[in-house]
Amino acid sequence: MGCYPSRNKQRFPGYDGPLVLASQTSFTVSEVEALFEMFKDISGSMADDGLISKEEFQLALFKNSQKENLFANRIFELFDLKHRGAIDFSDFVRSLNVFHPNTSVDEKVNFEFKLYDLDDTGFIDRTEVKQMLDALQKESEMRFSDATVEAILDKTFQDIDGNHDGKIDKDEWINFVSRRPSLMKIMTLPYLKDVTTTFPSFVFNSEVDDIAT
């Protein structure tokens, strides 16, 4: 499988070659080349512009370009490193790198914290956790009473919010994750070491369930 740098730079905005990306990530050159094949399929699924739009991202995850999902939307935002409403190939590889088995635990914890810090304030507050619970209910078709939701929120902050200021900071999150290593399991996708053209399935809902239990 080969990548042709000059041609790809013209067709794919923000394209960096396999050697460059392999030197900056945990991926090998051959893994980057496999990711490029995957990227071409996804970025050309609705518009042949060399970028992955939000709709193409949703289509790859759910086979439905119109499906709304809080976690998929947030992942798209975090993958869109240049904040232009689309993901280029270099951003795609650098972002997926956090899920590589050889990527450090610190990088994974930091990404996970940002994933749940929906408002990018540097804290996870009660409103954000409630949004995640609501999304979990929607996806799983579970239904909690308002009283149960409030009880889950109370328990979550009792367990994580060490200084009782009503929000979870990075240090509190790191401490919590160190006590609940199962929360990190979805931050590693083993098959990224044997990449195919199938887009990884990000299953974050189960983790929110773990946080709340």
Image: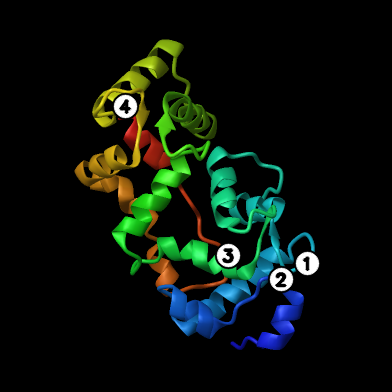
The residue that mark 2 highlights is 13
Nearer the camera: disc 4 or disc 3: 3
| Residue depicted at 34% across the width and 16% down the height | 151
Q: Which residue is mark 3?
A: 91
Q: State yes or no: discs 1 and 2 in contact (Cβ < 8 Å).
A: yes
Q: Amino acid at mark 3?
A: Asp
The Cα–Cα distance between marks 4 and 3, rounded to whole angstroms, is 33 Å
Q: CA distance from mark 1 to mark 4?
A: 43 Å
Viewer-nearest of discs 1 and 2? 2
In front here: 87 or 172?
172
Q: Residue furthest top?
A: 147
- Give the farthest residue toward the left: 179
Distance (Cα) linking label 4 and label 2 = 42 Å
Local SS, label 2: loop
Please tell me which residue lies in front, 138 or 160: 160
Place of residue 153 in the rendered image (x, y in percent of width and height, measured from the top left): 37, 22
Packing grade of label 2 (10 A; few <14, some 14-19, many >=20) is some
Is 19 rendered above or below residue 176?
A: below
Disc number at residue 128? none
Q: Which mark is residue 156?
A: 4
Given contact means CB atoms under 8 Å apart, are the residues at marks 3 and 1 in contact?
no
Of pointers 1 and 2, the one earlier in the residue sequence:
2
